[in-house]
Image (cartoon, rainbow, N blue to C red):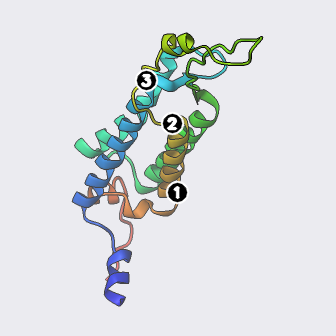
Amino acid sequence: MMNLLSKIAEKPSDKTIRITRVVFALLVLTTILLGWTVTRTEFNLPEWIKYVLFVFPTIGLIRWIFDPGIFRKKIWKWTIFGLGMSMMIVSLFVIEDQAIIPATPVIAENTGSINATDLVNATPISVPFTLSTDNFFGFFGFIIAIMGILLNSKNITKKNERHAEIVKKIRV
């Protein structure tokens, strides 16, 4: 039991961190693509705003491929937290899922019954499997914000660990 707790408490390897980044980025990208047909923008914003959603998985893929050591740990912490919060804000205020309403047959007013010819002439829905991009995007943003605040030291590679820090005291 103590070995399991110590294994969980230690920092993962750089390879594990990078694999986790790419899996999460691909998961967000897949969610965006599967929900693309039912996602719309709010407040009469232009439809090209939806392409901004691809920025978030792109950052994860860049961090996986290049692993740029350009920020210190504290800056990455607030950058990751800010990305998570912006994903939640986009989910709450910018994007919304369209309701897919099937064509309903017309009910005759005088008899209150459905005409069989109307059922044959009803157009089927031609929408493939979709996901709720709005809800999942907010959920992923919440996970990223929590990772930024609480688990940032477990999510940063050794290359970024001490970037641009000046050692003033050497402890023996």
Q: Is residue 164 left or right of residue 85?
A: left
**Pointer 3 residue:** 127
- With respect to residue 140, does 92 lie above or below? above
- With respect to residue 11, does 49 lie above or below? above
- Disc on the earlier residue, 1 or 3: 3
Q: Are marks 1 and 2 in contact (CB under 8 Å)?
A: no
Q: Classify mark 1: residues with Cα within 10 Å, few (<14), some (14-19) or many (20+).
A: some
* Dot 2 amino acid type: Ser
Q: Are marks 1 and 3 in contact (CB under 8 Å)?
A: no
The quadrant of the rendering that contains the N terminus is bottom left
* Dot 3 amino acid type: Val
Mark 2 vs mark 3: in front: 3
Q: Is residue 13 visible?
A: yes
* Dot 1 amino acid type: Ile
- With respect to residue 100, does 24 lie above or below? below
Mark 1 vs mark 2: in front: 2
Q: Classify mark 2: residues with Cα within 10 Å, few (<14), some (14-19) or many (20+).
A: some
- Disc on the earlier residue, 2 or 3: 3
**Pointer 1 residue:** 146
Cα distance between the residues tagged 1 and 3: 34 Å
Q: Measured from the top left, where is residue 68 in percent x and y? A: 29, 44
Mark 1 vs mark 3: in front: 3
Q: Number of labelled discs?
A: 3
Q: Is residue 143 left or right of residue 164?
A: right
Q: Classify mark 3: residues with Cα within 10 Å, few (<14), some (14-19) or many (20+).
A: few
Is label 2 in a helix, a strand or a loop?
A: loop
**Pointer 2 residue:** 132
The structure residue drawn at horizontal position 51% and vertical position 20%, both measured from the top left corner, is 49
Cα distance between the residues tagged 2 and 3: 13 Å
The structure residue drawn at horizontal position 27% and vertical position 53%, both measured from the top left corner, is 18
- Disc on the earlier residue, 1 or 2: 2
